[in-house]
Image: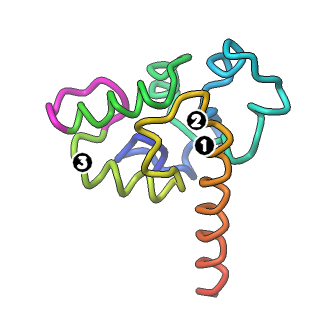
Amino acid sequence: MSLLSNNVLVRDLIEGGDVHHIFPKEYLKSEGYEKSSYNQEANYVFLDSQVNKSIGKKAPNVYFSQARRQCERGEIAIGSITNQDQLMENLAMNCVPEDVFEMDHRDYSDFLEKRRVLMARKIRTYYESL
């Protein structure tokens, strides 16, 4: 599933979806980050266009917290997940560290390092299953 969605598959987005910066490009630019910093593979994820628009330039701690509150209240604000277990499963599926709910630009380097490890583990698990 695509990030913050329980009804959109990544394979369906590859041809027509948005590649999103988990730490939004404009957010990082406003904090003084250069293109070589924010355009990192570990910062990319496929999203449905509507979710990407609702995220906009928000810091991860803002929009992921909105997604968590959505699970508590059942009111759709960002994405389509309204269950805490599904949200955490979606983060794991997309190799997003669980502490993303507290992350802002000061945590970006730490985020990249953590996500690279999660991505490598996922690739290794897949490879070993072949």
* Colour setting: rainbow
Q: Is residue 104 magenta?
A: no
* Circle nearer the N terminus (3, 2): 2
Say left or right for 47 vs 98.
right
Q: Which residue is mark 3?
A: 84
Say left or right for 68 vs 111.
left
Q: Is residue 74 magenta?
A: yes
Which residue sits at x=24%, y=31%?
69
The dot on residue 22 is 2
Badge 1: how crowded within 10 Å, few (<14), some, or many (20+)?
A: some
Residue 70, position as x, y percentages in the image: 24, 32
Say left or right for 71 vs 35.
left
Say left or right for 111 vs 82.
right
Q: Which residue is mark 1?
A: 45
Q: Quadrant of residue 92?
A: bottom left
Tell me if label 1 and label 3 are in contact, CB under 8 Å.
no
* Circle nearer the N terminus (1, 3): 1
How far is mark 1 from mark 2, CA to CA? Answer: 7 Å
Q: Residue furthest top?
A: 30
How far is mark 3 from mark 2, CA to CA? Answer: 19 Å
Q: Residue furthest right?
A: 36
Badge 3: how crowded within 10 Å, few (<14), some, or many (20+)?
A: some
Which residue sits at x=79%, y=33%?
37
Magenta residues (range): 72-80
Q: Give the answer, above or below, for where 119 lies relative to 102.
A: below
Which residue sits at x=77%, y=34%?
39
> Closest to the observer: 76 or 71?
71
> Tag 2's secondary structure?
loop
Q: Amino acid at mark 1?
A: Val
Q: Amino acid at mark 3?
A: Gln
Q: Quadrant of residue 57?
A: top right
> Tag 1's secondary structure?
strand
